[in-house]
Amino acid sequence: MSGAPRERSTNLADYQPRHAGNKTFRLKNAQKPVLKTLRKVEESIKDDGVELDKNKPISVTKLSNPLHSVSVPSLLRRHELVLHSNLSLSASCSSDASTDSFHSRASTGRMYRTSRTSNWRNHLGSKAKNVVPEPLPDDLQVKRRCAWVTANTDPSYVTFHDEEWGVPAHDDNKLFELLVLCGALAEITWPAILSRRHIFREVFADFDPIAVAKMNEKKIIAPGSPGSSLLSELKLRAIIDNARQVSKVINEFGSFDNYIWGFVKHKPIVGRFRYPRQVPVRTSKADLISKDLVRRGFRSVGPTVVYSFMQVAGITNDHLISCFRFHDCDAAEVKKEEDDIKEKASSEIQLEICESIDELNLSSE
């Protein structure tokens, strides 16, 4: 057949079903929701200010099947449900912080889901790699120390570790003090020694070996004296005897520093230990120094005491390589060597100047 398609009314009230049976029953049941939807459409049109002519039915062209008349309001209803579900899904996604997003096409009513999990993680990963944390102030940074310094360590010992332990010492009074304190380790611990350090310095005249060598033993070891509260009588007598031997070493070598550092050729031994179990309690060098001290008349200077003295005085750097003081102690010794070189160079220059002046004086005469 040819010609224009015939327009058919979409008003279900004017539509008379031609088929009997189940199709007629389904159409009758479908009229109720369809009519409700049409009423809602009419009400929405009235709200917009447009008058609708009830006598003029809504027409749709090119319909070959009478059942297609139901498709318009059903599509409207389906589109409304899709929009409603899209809104509810968007709300649920925003509340649950979901990485999946749901989309709908208004033209077809289809729904599809796109996963953005991998892109989201990659985006965060790229940002995390580019973020550089700002350095904390020095007072807030956690300093990594030797393993035997823990959170429960006495604060005085922590300060001693951070400022004195392992720093190369070259002053005779300082070396004598450290030798005395290491000898006291046989009776008391480092925290106890450091808490009484001011008493030690008061009793032994700031550890001046020449002044201590002249002290009266009876006054120091007398019951009730400050010295008697520090150590046993045997240790107190050993300190005075060692002070006398240090005085003799100073007369022989010019200083106790020259004598004791001569065993390591005036350069500290660097342990470079990674774990505490690798740090020894005595070495062959400590045995050699201990034997020479005993030969000279020193007391309470066994290999263990001598090696502890070497560690404290910086003769050996036994800070663990992970400790922040490991490189600081090396830097202190390098600075000391540079200062010695400069001092030696300046003294040589002064000597040359004096010699040139003397030559000029002789030539003028």
Image (cartoon, grey):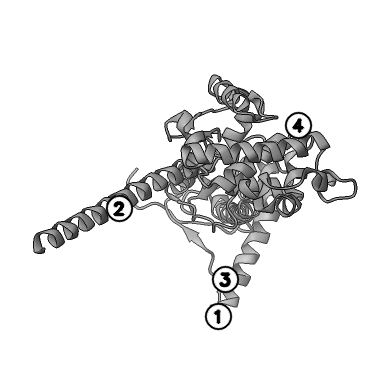
Q: Amino acid at mark 2?
A: Ser
Q: Residue at x 48, y 48 (%)?
A: 108
- Disc 1 and disc 2 in contact, CB within 8 angstroms: no
Res. 55 mark: 3
Q: Residue at x 80, y 33 (%)?
A: 234
Q: Amino acid at mark 1?
A: Gly
- Disc 1 and disc 4 in contact, CB within 8 angstroms: no
Q: Residue furthest top?
A: 284
Q: Nearer the viewer, residue 25 or 167?
A: 167
- Residue position for label 4: 186
Give neighbour class at mark 1: few <14, some 14-19, many 20+ (Cα, 10 Å).
Answer: few
Q: Nearer the viewer, residue 94 or 341?
A: 341
The N terminus is located in which quarter?
Answer: top left
- Disc 3 and disc 1 in contact, CB within 8 angstroms: no
Give the distance between the C-alpha atoms of the residues marked 1 and 4, in whole angstroms.
104 Å
Which mark is nearer the camera, 3 or 2? 2
Q: Amino acid at mark 3?
A: Asn
Give the distance between the C-alpha atoms of the residues marked 3 and 2, in whole angstroms.
124 Å
Which label's residue is closer to the chain start, 3 or 2?
3
- Residue position for label 2: 347
Q: Amino acid at mark 4?
A: Ala
